[in-house]
Amino acid sequence: MPVLVMKFGGTSVATLDRIRRAAKRVGVEVAKGYDVIVIVSAMSGKTNELVGWVGETSPLYDAREYDAVVSSGENVTAGLMALTLQEMDVPARSWQGWQVPVRTTNAHSSARIEDIPPKNINTKFDEGMRVAVVAGFQGVSPEGRITTLGRGGSDTTAVAFAAAFGAERCDIYTDVDGVYTTDPRVSAKARRLDKIAFEEMLELASLGAKVLQTRSVELAMRYKVKLRVLSSFEEQSDTAGTLVCDEEEIMESNVVAGVAFSRDEAKMTLVSVADRPGIAASIFTALSDAGVNVDMIVQNIAEEGRTDMTWSCPTDQVARAQKAIEAAKADGTINYHEVIADTDVAKVSVVGIGMRSHTGVAAKMFQVLSAEGVNIKVITTSEIKISVLIDRKYMELAVQALHDAFELEKAA
Ligand code: ASP
Ligand code: MG
């Protein structure tokens, strides 16, 4: 029988009543003839509570025990979902990660899935089970310890199961009804997209659109898993939500699919560093060793053997970055006049695969910002994305103006 993966996020299983509502949706798909793999998150708020308990008990916790505690929220919902389905006379049972098994690396708290052998679950499907309810977010390490996949990891569990079982589709039920051209809280004209290409979704997810864990989109793209994002609070239908799919499946795509933004960016500049081979390596090795997530990087033209180096990173990593840079100066690895941190910036990006074949998107973006009197501090581009750093106070204005200029209110 064809397999469907259905994933329910924390808000969709937040109460027994909502679990019942989700189980009914599963029942509809079972009645259509699908064998269903249901991936569940913990009830909303549960994982945060568990993370808090670990920190209170042991500030420098053992990551293996963190995973043992934090993975438990999903076990509860998996069992409750299986019970609810049984009450509806749907043959179902729950599976914890190790029982499947979901084999992962041993990078505790951010493990990667290596393999999901379908044999155990398929044997049960052959024996008449119709729904396998799997606890998301967790797996088992080569040492046999429980691992977790990083916050939001149930999305990745769902896509990995869809790939491993050759599922027809992977439906991600959440509290929003799809992927929007921008955050509707920032622009009232934001529109829900019927379809979006994997690559666009990947850019939007990594730029801060929090609908899907970035790694789940990477996996879906690699294994060509059709992903659908839809609300568990609306009428069930085959065309609801947003389909994340291969670009070939999108007949006519807009040049720009969406405007993304991220509020908590900081810009740091090393003023007057010696311009010599290896200088960028020294700076960014120091930052990476300190665990700083560098995003944009700009090196200025050198003058008299000195240059300025600018990068962006999350605001809450500025102190760490500063410390790493000062330590590298103290031990003579790098040498500069001054380090400047600007923590009042935001990043705004336009994303769209149409940029590959259309020129003028950057020019238009810069004209729009200039017409609004917004100064651009840093620019970076990729094949399908243009990002700018601007003063944070102009972020909403910039997003709205760009959304208007690229006519995203007409998007579908
Ligand atoms: N419960 C986990 C979290 O809150 C995993 C997930 O829901 O995706 O991060
Ligand atoms: Mg999530």
Image: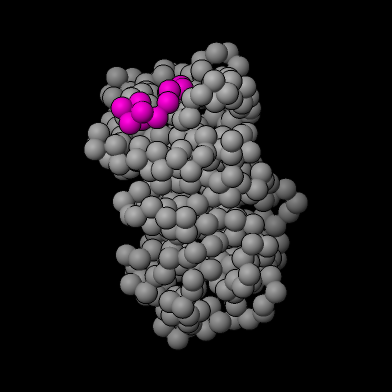
- Observer-nearest of 368 and 213: 213
Task: Give how far across and how far down residue 356 sits, in percent.
Answer: 69, 70
Q: Does residue 57 sit above or below 89 in this rendering? A: above
Residue 112 as seen in the image, left or right of residue 322: right
Residue 378 as seen in the image, left or right of residue 41: right
- Observer-nearest of 32 and 70: 32
Q: What residue lies at 27% left-to-right and 40% top-to-bottom?
A: 18
Q: What residue lies at 31% left-to-right and 51% top-to-bottom?
A: 233
- Look at the image and say whether residue 340 sits in the magenta stretch: no
Residue at the extreme bottom of the image, as rendered: 371
Q: What range is drawn magenta here?
A: 85-96
Residue 230 as seen in the image, left or right of residue 228: left
Q: Does residue 178 sit above or below 326 in this rendering? A: below
Quadrant where the N terminus is found in the figure: top right
Task: Give how far across and how far down residue 408 sits, in percent.
Answer: 47, 75
The number of numbered discs placed on residues in the rendered structure image is 0
Q: How is the image coloured?
A: one colour
Task: Give how far across and how far down residue 160 sits, in percent.
Answer: 58, 36
Q: What residue lies at 32% left-to-right and 65% top-to-bottom?
A: 185
Residue at the extreme right of the image, as rendered: 277
Quarter of the view holding residue 87? top left
Quarter of the view holding residue 337? bottom right
Q: Does residue 52 sit above or below 364 in this rendering? A: above
- Observer-nearest of 64 and 220: 220
- The answer to whether residue 399 of the structure is visible from this angle is yes
- Observer-nearest of 292 and 22: 22
Q: What residue lies at 48% left-to-right and 46% top-to-bottom?
A: 171
